[in-house]
Amino acid sequence: MTWPSNQPPKPGLTAEDIARLNEKFAQSDAALGIEVSPEFRPFEQRNDIFTRAFWDEEVSSDDTLGFFKSYRMKFATRRGAGFSQKDFALRNASWAVSDILSSRGGEEGKREGFQAPIDYDTPVANDKVPVEDAGQEAEEIKRLAKLFGADLVGITEVDERWHYSSRVDTRDFTSAPNDLPDGITHVIVMGHAMDPDLVDTYPSALAGASTGLEYSHETQIVIQLSTYIRNLGYEAVGSMNDTALVIPYAVKAGLGEYGRNQMVITPEFGPRIRFSKIFTSLPLQVDEPKPLGIKQYCEICTRCAGACPPRALPFGAPDSVAHNRSTLSGVKKWSADCEKCFGYWAKLKTDCAICMRVCPFNRRYDGWVDRVFRALATGPYRKLALWWQERRGAPARLKAQDWWAKIRAGGG
């Protein structure tokens, strides 16, 4: 493991640190639906499945390299419905803003927003705006985040267990320090809802536009809100997939519950949402994880696992099984086999997310039927909701040609 010169790694969390944090956050862990063992250690980002595709022979293949090349149109399209040149072109265009940001730090080994936090252009103001009421300040920050375009916002304390033990130097895919400025105390977590019609076309390259759109949207929102906070005189580090696992933070911030499909399922959008975060020293009142009843429904529902083509999702109860080095160890929870999952993505040359599309909570909640289902599924009558879903069956996949026809007709 090589560290850049003059940047020695900070000491990692010790067993005593883990025990202290496990005790401190026992309540939020219960809300997360997980159990953190004394053997737990933070995850090394170099082992995430996307990074392993560049250095690990067990994952890297012509298929995986072709997956990444497809985002630059360096591939032969399948040319079937949902995988035409137009479908890939729209998907890749949706990523454009995020791609511009993530490529600007390449010479320093940083892929901003993914394998390094977002570099800031605005220094912290010399004078701090006084914060007399952390609760009022939190409400104001939430309203401003929504002004910039976020759909959901929650706030929680920093919990170093979920921070990567190291980030990735993208020049050679070795580990590099994953440090934050001193004084960081809170995390602002923002949710960004994905386009429901595009999600309904999974699996397809067209559906991948729903992911890219929100990464590009959140790039803008994270930069804007971070800049605002820095102008107030406080540290603010913008983050997307980098620095820390976002799922624990989203649940800790009260935005949803962890589901069998490895996603945060929210009351407003189900699993059809992406998350970003800002690490800050701004004094803020925190939100508490909410018992929503979603996890209890997932315990009796296996629709996502049954619909997964490579059988990467679990059918049973949460456990501590580590499928491979891309599984967070020392945590009892539902875990996917990331190698199987990404292997299927690589064959498609795009993300899959069938598990998101077929999830019973993937609804628009703009009609009474959806709201009645949610009330049943998250309450004592969840078995009735499950019976209802089994009789109804999974919603049919929206055909890509029908989505394009809607666009041509002006109904996008």
Image (spheres, rainbow, N blue to C red):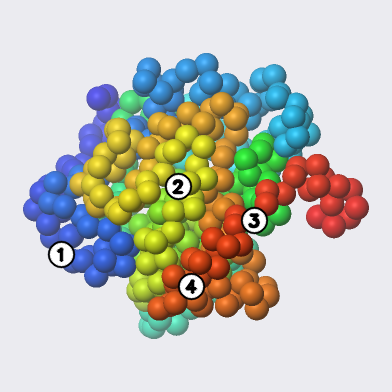
Query: From mark 4 to mark 2, how far is it between C-alphas?
Result: 20 Å
Residue 356, horizontal then vertical, whole percent: 54, 52
Q: Residues within 10 Å of mark 1 (few under 14, many from 20)?
A: few
Work out which quarter of the rendered image holds the N terminus and state it: top left
Compute the Cα span from label 1 to label 2. Answer: 32 Å
> Label 3: few (<14), some or many (≥20) within 10 Å?
few
Name the amino acid, label 4: Leu
**Left or right placement of residue 404 versus residue 322 in this view:** right
**Residue at 51% from the left image edge and 77% from the top image edge:** 375
Residue at the image position 44 percent from the left and 20 percent from the top: 60
Q: Comparing marks 4 and 2, which lies closer to the viewer? A: 4
**Which residue lies under the disc numbered 2?**
305
Q: Amino acid at mark 3?
A: Pro
- Whether residues under marks 4 and 3 lie with C-beta atoms below 8 angstroms apart, the answer is no
- Residue 384's tag is 4
Q: Percent x, y for residue 359?
A: 53, 56
Dot 4 or dot 3, earlier in sequence: 4
What amino acid is labelled 1 in the image?
Glu
Q: CA distance from mark 4 to mark 3?
A: 18 Å
**Nearer the observer, disc 4 or disc 3?**
4
Dot 2 amino acid type: Ala
The answer to whether residue 109 of the structure is visible from this angle is no
Kindly identify which numbered label has been placed on residue 23.
1
